[in-house]
Image (cartoon, rainbow, N blue to C red):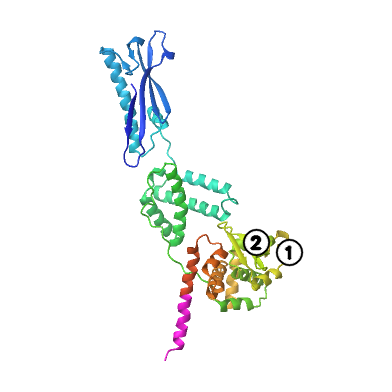
Amino acid sequence: MNVNLNRKGGNEMETKISILFYGKKSRITKSNLLPIYLRVTIAGQRFETCTHRTVTPGKWSVEAGRMKGSSEEARRINTYLDMLRSRVYAYQQELLQEHKQVTIEAIKDKWLGVEEKPVMLLEVFQKHNEQVKQLVGKDFAPGTLERYRTSLLHTSNFIKWKYKAADIDVKKLDFGFISDYEFWLKSVRNCAHNTTMKYLGNFKKVIHICLKNGWLQRDPFLGFRMSKKEVVRAFLTKEELQKIAAREFEIERLSQVRDIFLFSCFTGLAYADVQKLKRTEIVTGPDGGKWVYTSRQKTDTVSRIPLLSVALSILEQYNEHPQCLNLDRVLPVLSNQKMNAYLKEIADLCGIHKPLTFHIARHTFATTITLSNGVPIESVSRMLGHTNIKTTQHYAKILDQKVSEDMQLLKNKFKL
């Protein structure tokens, strides 16, 4: 008998199961008995198994899929076949209740008693990182891989702290896991709020992999707020820039770091982009002047920047520098750690009381050099290589603060 079972509920897709009992003539026994087989069909795929019951060929009804008659043997065999049919239905219900897709493989595994191997969180995370590693230089920057590796390490340490275990089944992930992870990052790891959100953002990428593969049925981040706190980043004023540019340093290395920092202040290039900038990326632009044509390492977005006279003079100064000639670079850039260490020394010597880091140069270009001098925010966004103008609008908010400070000075002058 061919039986169709249709189920439809919640968000589950309609499941059609066909159940058929038949006598397999190719396996007829030496005693001329017909073995009864069960066939389950889902979406055109079949699973067949022997019921370990046999009948005399003449007593089997092909149309009904049952043994003919009302004898004790017929009642016994037909009752057993009904039990097997109910067993298939029960497995289907189990899969639906577990929010799993009803497939022929899933039914077969349940029938054979095959235990489903749990999907472990850190194993998924590690596989993700291995794939990112293979795509470094193509789809990802080296820094992206490093961030995912750090996030994996934090996740591993959190699981040891909370569960006293080396790994965890992804099915155990819920809202409480995310909330406790946030608490751990902020308390045990002493991460700032925005840094915590960055790590959770990396972790969320792995959660999406689990959701798309059906290993996790409910997003544990559902209802969790991932908002970042606004941070007003420091930038240099025109007067501070002039102090740094005019300062004479006895140590040549300080002068070199100062020059490279100023080049970034007048181009908006991040450290990684200045470090990798090749001579071939300095080209003649549409206006006949020199431009930077490069791609940002962080986002692989295009940056097209007309070079101001200050930036041009710095490039000319290092045109014959041995490091630049050997590496085909425009500037002899040191490691980011060394650059920032020297910049702190430069800030002290110039009397600048700000935490001077190389990244401040990029903020200075956006604020002091461009936006405060009337360059449209759309042009600034393009030069910075931002993928979203909202990122650039953050600098406009900084300028509002600057306007407020300047107007306060004006108010003081007009006090009667």
Q: Which percent across, then down, holds residue 402?
A: 48, 76
Label 2 secondary element: loop
Q: Quadrant of residue 322?
A: bottom right
Front in this rendered view, residue 242 or 294: 294
In the image, is residue 156 above or below residue 344? above
| Quadrant of the frame with the N terminus | top left
Residue at 51% x, 53% y is 150
Q: Is residue 279 left or right of residue 33?
A: right
Q: To which residue does mark 2 refer?
A: 277
Residue 348 highlighted magenta (yes or no): no
Residue 166 visible to an observer of this rendering: no
As drawn, the residue found furthest toward the top would be: 31
The residue under label 2 is which amino acid type? Leu
Classify 10 Å Cα crowding around label 1: few (below 14), some (14-19), many (20 and above).
Answer: few
Q: Quadrant of residue 226?
A: bottom left
Considering the numbered disc 1 on the image, is that residue within a helix, a strand or a loop? helix
Instruction: Please give the range of residues in magenta.
Output: 401-416
Identified at 34% across, 37% down, the residue is: 96
Closer to viewer: mark 2 or mark 1: 2
Q: Which residue is mark 1?
A: 322
